[in-house]
Each structure stands twice: as C-alpha cells, then as structure tokens.
Image (tube, helix red, strand yellow):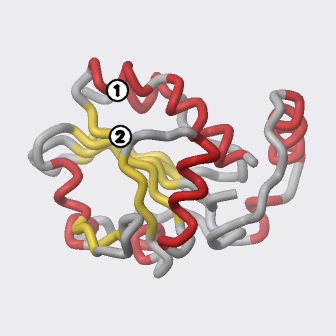
C-alpha cells in the first residue's frame, strides 16, 4: 500500500509540484495530514 | 476548527521540532489558493502543502467517510475546541477526508504512521517527536 508514497507529489502555495521524498532528504520529516483548511 | 486547533498546537511546539532536527510539514486537501489564508490564520511558519487529488491520503490509508464525522468523540472535541476559542471557519478541502501523520527518516524508513479514526483524532506532539 505505502510502497509508492515517496513518489507522490504535493502542491505548494504557488501551485508547484513537490515530490514527497524531497521532504525527508536532509532531516527526518514529520508530515501531518489535516482534514481540511477550515 | 479541529484542524486550526491542531496546527496551532504544532506552531506552539515548532521549536521542539527544530531541536529534534525534524522537518515539520502540514498537508491539506484544498486548492493551493487556500494555503496563504490558512497560514495567516494559524500563524504556522513551517512547510505547508496540499494534495487536492487526495492521492497521498489514499495511498497512506487515511479514511474518507461520513462516519468519521459523527459520534460522541467529534462532538466532545468540537465543544473543547469552541471552549478554547476556536470557531468554525470556511472549510477548504474535502470535508469527509480524515487525516493522519507520517514520520519518515532520511533513508525513507517510516518511523511512525497514524491514521485518524474520527474528526479531531490526531497524534500528540509527543508521538510526533518520538519514533527514533
């Protein structure tokens, strides 16, 4: 199920794609997924 | 409401994440245009990203159903959030999508994986800082 998560892309505030693996390149990453921005 | 409360708590502990050399990122499901407003409201200074496709939520096994929004626990959480001064705002993102958390080491090992079971159910800061 989770094998491919590193290849997934997210969007930043400018709408640019960020590959998830970039988030833990230099530091351990703590990724908090929220329900919504409300 | 819960989300702003959760992110406010993370913002309060931002220095703890820095001290443990952890890159904190908050990820939602709205369009990117919602991010600046959310950042302003929460005063969160870390990495803020979004996945409107919900693909990452799906791959990581986060629940998406109406059952996660009903019941005593979400109700009690809403009361607690209201008492703490958090008021419901305009929802930006998928309202039935539940969240969770993932801690990933630099070599790609997953150190911690949390799937929320209800609205308002999220891991503690201590859990997010642990997992070494």
Q: Where residue B4 appears, x then y in whole percent?
A: 66, 45
Residue B54's label in the rendered image is none
The residue sitting at 65% across, 48% down in the picture is: B3
Element class at badge 2: strand
Q: Position of residue B93 (x, y in %)?
A: 62, 70
In the shown orientation, is residue B74 left or right of residue B8? right
Q: Residue A8 lies in what quarter of the image?
A: bottom left
The picture places residue A38, in percent across and down from the top left corner, at: 70, 57
Q: Chain of mark 1?
A: B
Check disc 1 and report the residue beneath it: B17
Residue at 12% x, 49% y: name it. A25
Residue B49 position (above or below residue B96) = above
Chain bearing tag 2 is: B
Residue B86 locus on image (x, y percent): 79, 39
* Cα gap from disc 1 to disc 2, whole angstroms: 7 Å
Do discs 1 and 2 belong to a common subunit? yes
Q: Which mark is residue B24?
A: 2
Residue lying at 24% horizontally and 26% vertically, measured from the top left: B132
Q: Are marks 1 and 2 in contact (CB under 8 Å)?
A: yes
Q: On the rendered structure, is A31 left or right of B42?
A: left
Mark 1 secondary-structure assignment: helix
Apparent side of residue B92 relative to residue B115 in the rendered image (left or right): right
Q: Residues within 10 Å of mark 1 (few under 14, many from 20)?
A: some
N-term mark: 1 or 2: 1
Instruction: Check the image and report above or below for B17 versus B73.
Output: above
């Amino acid at each position: 199920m989770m094998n491919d998560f590193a290849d997934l892309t997210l969007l930043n505030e400018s709408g640019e794609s960020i590959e998830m693996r970039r988030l833990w390149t230099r530091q351990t990453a703590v990724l908090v997924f929220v329900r919504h921005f409300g | 409401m819960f989300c702003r409360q959760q992110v406010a708590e993370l913002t309060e502990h931002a220095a703890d994440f820095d001290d443990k050399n952890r890159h904190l990122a908050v990820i939602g499901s709205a369009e990117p245009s919602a991010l600046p407003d959310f950042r302003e409201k929460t005063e969160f200074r870390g990495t803020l990203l979004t996945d409107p496709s919900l693909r990452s939520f799906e791959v990581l096994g986060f629940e998406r159903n109406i059952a996660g929004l009903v019941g005593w626990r979400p109700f009690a959480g809403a009361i607690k959030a209201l008492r703490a001064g958090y008021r419901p705002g305009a929802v930006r993102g998928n309202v039935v999508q539940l969240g969770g958390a993932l801690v990933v080491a630099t070599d790609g090992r997953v150190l911690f994986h949390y799937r929320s079971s209800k609205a308002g159910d999220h891991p503690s800061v201590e859990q997010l800082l642990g997992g070494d």
